[in-house]
Image (cartoon, rainbow, N blue to C red):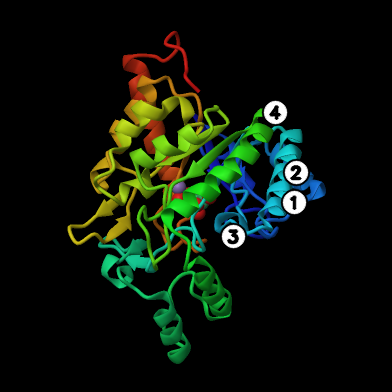
């Protein structure tokens, strides 16, 4: 297991590279050019800039999260070919600085969705929260109207300045079914995976979060069956998975340990975090510790260890602790605690049965 840590870039993150360097066992950053809009080719000078910053701190940049996929690709519009060309050009450039894994997702319009970014927990910390009944059955057009009428009403991702853009995207997705989205994903992968292969890069799709359709938009990377289907589209190590335990874990029916056993050879990148799912379907992001949530983190780490996992892993969203002001879910403290928990589990497993000699699978 090679531990890495997400970093949003100089001036764009409250956590510095020197802080990251002090977390035990972290060898690299998980990075992206967050100011380059989806669909554009990444400029080489900016890539070199991040490379130089990372190298100065003795950190590598093997893992990129994410090279975002332009909506026209997800919508299957004719302009997608141009955006796919740009995507391939970016892959080729990233190979020049030694990138090994590119994480991406195929969620229409939104990345992860939550109803509250700072839900207060009993111990005084705050965390990202999803209230299911607030989202279920929402007609997105009605919500836009409501937000327009009532200026204090808002939801993460629904900021007033985005509303016009959101409305036109919702219009565009009206006729797009889950099957259409699968087709558009296949078209994208068939074009991009051979290029990634040539470059020695592994593409790794991030699951949908939460893993079910919201706001009437299709979502397709939701569980074990969808991962099977994804891997069949292009049978290559360069068509892989970012196995995010927190995203899949929001649906208690997902058997994450089973996914690791089935797909371990196609998981170059693991996101490991916990969530607590309530009976009514709400969920909150907890500490990484197994007992604190409903995801069996200890069992997950053991499953990776059983397979001699030598891919990259990072803690995922954390709570906001000790009055830290940070990007929602991306503070230093809870993610650093998470890493120490993951290492604790890992090292204990190593004591019992060292991987060395078993042979890794990734
Ligand atoms: C999230 C996502 O769970 C996560 O890691 O923070 O934003 C994730 O980075 C993207 O969906 C990956 O493309
Ligand atoms: Mn994740």
Mark 3 residue element? helix
Give the alpha-carbon distance from disc 1 to disc 2, as whole Å.
Answer: 6 Å
Residue lying at 47% horizontally and 68% vertically, measured from the top left: 174
* Of the pair 66 and 176, the residue shown nearer to us: 176
CB under 8 Å between discs 4 and 2? no
Query: Looking at the image, how many numbered discs can be counted on the residues?
Result: 4
Please state the horizontal and vertical placement of residue 62, each as a whole percent of the image.
63, 35
- For label 1, the crowd category at 10 Å Cα-Cα, with few meaning under 14, some 14 to 19 and many 20 or more, is some
Residue 121 placement, left or right of 204 = left
CB under 8 Å between discs 1 and 2? yes
Disc 2: which residue: 89
- For label 2, the crowd category at 10 Å Cα-Cα, with few meaning under 14, some 14 to 19 and many 20 or more, is some
Q: Earlier in the sequence, mark 2 or mark 3?
A: 3
Residue 41 is tagged as 1
Disc 3: which residue: 71
Disc 4: which residue: 198
CB under 8 Å between discs 2 and 3? no
Q: Earlier in the sequence, mark 4 or mark 3?
A: 3
Residue lying at 30% horizontally and 68% vertically, measured from the top left: 136
């Amino acid at each position: 297991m090679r531990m890495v840590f997400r970093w949003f870039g100089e001036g764009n993150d409250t956590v510095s590279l020197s802080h990251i360097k002090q977390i035990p066992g972290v060898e690299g950053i998980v990075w992206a050019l967050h100011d380059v809009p989806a669909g554009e080719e990444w400029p080489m000078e900016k890539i070199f800039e991040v490379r130089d910053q990372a190298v100065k701190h003795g950190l590598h940049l093997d893992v990129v999260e994410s090279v975002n996929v332009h909506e026209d690709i997800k919508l299957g519009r004719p302009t997608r070919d141009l955006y796919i060309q740009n995507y391939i050009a970016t892959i080729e450039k990233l190979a020049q600085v030694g990138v090994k894994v590119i994480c991406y997702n195929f969620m229409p319009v939104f990345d992860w969705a939550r109803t509250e970014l700072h839900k207060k927990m009993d111990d005084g910390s705050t965390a990202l929260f999803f209230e299911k009944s607030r989202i279920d059955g929402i007609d997105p057009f009605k919500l836009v109207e409501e937000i327009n009428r009532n200026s204090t009403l808002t939801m993460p991702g629904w900021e007033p300045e985005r509303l016009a853009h959101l409305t036109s995207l919702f219009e565009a997705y009206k006729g797009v079914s889950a099957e259409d989205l699968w087709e558009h994903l296949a078209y994208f992968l068939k074009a991009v995976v051979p290029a990634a292969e040539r470059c020695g890069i592994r593409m790794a799709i991030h699951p949908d979060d939460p893993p079910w359709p919201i706001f009437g938009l299709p979502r397709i990377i939701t569980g074990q069956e969808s991962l099977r289907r994804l891997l069949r589209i292009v049978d290559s190590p360069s068509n892989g998975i970012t196995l995010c335990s927190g995203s899949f874990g929001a649906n208690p029916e997902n058997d994450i340990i089973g996914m690791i056993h089935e797909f371990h050879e196609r998981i170059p990148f693991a996101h490991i975090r916990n969530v607590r799912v309530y009976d009514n379907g709400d969920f909150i992001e907890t500490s990484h510790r197994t007992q604190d949530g409903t995801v069996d983190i200890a069992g997950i780490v053991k499953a990776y260890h059983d397979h001699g996992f030598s891919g990259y892993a990072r803690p995922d969203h954390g709570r906001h602790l000790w009055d830290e002001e940070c990007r929602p879910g991306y503070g230093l403290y809870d993610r650093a605690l998470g890493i120490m928990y993951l290492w604790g589990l890992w090292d204990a497993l190593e004591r019992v049965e060292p991987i060395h000699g078993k042979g890794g699978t990734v």
